[in-house]
Amino acid sequence: MTSQQTRVKICGLKTADDIAAAVNAGASYVGFVFFPKSPRNIAIEDARALAAEVPVGVAKVALVVNADDAMLDAITSAVPLDILQLHGSESPERVLEIKARYGLPVMKAVGVAQADDLDDLARYGQVADQLLVDAKPPKGAELPGGNGLAFDWQLIAGRKWPVPWMLAGGLDAGNVAEAIRLTGARQVDVSSGVEVAPGQKDVAKIAAFCAASLNS
Ligand SMILES: O=C(O)c1ccccc1NCC(=O)[C@H](O)[C@H](O)COP(=O)(O)O
């Protein structure tokens, strides 16, 4: 039996070197964060320039947090994108609205800390094109994601949803193989785990993360 190779998303890229590192290491997705409070925030014009560096076959993902139509209009009209990642408290109705308005696949991030958070995964699995199964941010956290925190992977071991999903939260080159083994994830997403400082990606860490993921 052949098993499909794990697909990797590197999130929060801000420079041409970041893009080259992710692409050369074999990432399938690159993520741009449009959230001013984030150390990974990127200006729309900079994202547009970086998007031109991304080869065909690598998906360009825009991450937004409770973005209104004006913000989404500005991003989608400037940056050629493949996926919109909604990382706020967008309702299922808003997910459907965004899908219809922009004609792009939507990946909805859902934070997991305990068993009853899985109800949200079931709800969003009915409306989103993909799910991002992430750690729930700590109370009062400045960022709704990208906090370098893992959740208890046993909570989702053996779970299935009707759409493709990606595991995120506190992953790094040292733990991603175990995370994949325990959860059965076929896609993984990382940000802090491939950085040397918040918002500063590292070529060697990206390469090590991709190698550990792609070989799992
Ligand atoms: O990365 C950010 O700064 C960020 C800001 C606001 C919302 C979401 C954010 N990141 C979400 C991601 O896609 C991360 O890759 C995911 O949460 C995992 O992050 P990490 O635990 O740092 O690997």
Image: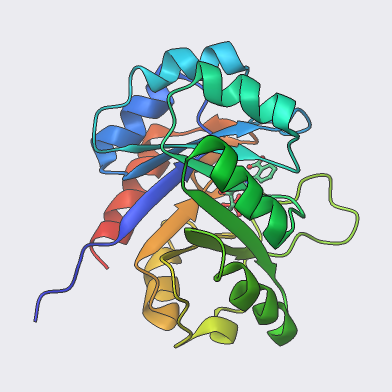
215, above or below 61, in the image = below
Give the camera-side residue of 112 and 206.
Answer: 112
Quadrant (top left, top right, bottom left, bottom right) of the C terminus = bottom left
Quadrant (top left, top right, bottom left, bottom right) of the N terminus = bottom left
Give the camera-side residue of 166 and 177.
Answer: 166
Residue 42 in view in this figure: no
| Residue at x 58%, y 59% (from the top left corner) | 170
83, above or below 35, in the image = below
In this rendering, position of residue 133 left or right of residue 88: left
| Residue at x 55%, y 46% (from the top left corner) | 99
Residue 178: % across, % down: 41, 75
Q: Residue furthest left?
A: 1
> Which quarter of the figure has residue 149?
bottom right
| Residue at x 42%, y 48% (from the top left corner) | 9
Residue 125: % across, % down: 55, 70
53, above or below 102, in the image = above
Residue 141: % across, % down: 84, 51
Q: Residue furthest right?
A: 140
In this rendering, position of residue 66 left or right of residue 199: right
Residue 164 in view in this figure: yes
Count all numbered tags in the image, as a single digit.
Answer: 0
The chosen color scheme is rainbow
Residue 121: % across, % down: 61, 73
119, above or below 72, in the image = below
| Residue at x 42%, y 27% (from the top left corner) | 18
Give the camera-side residue of 37 and 150.
Answer: 37
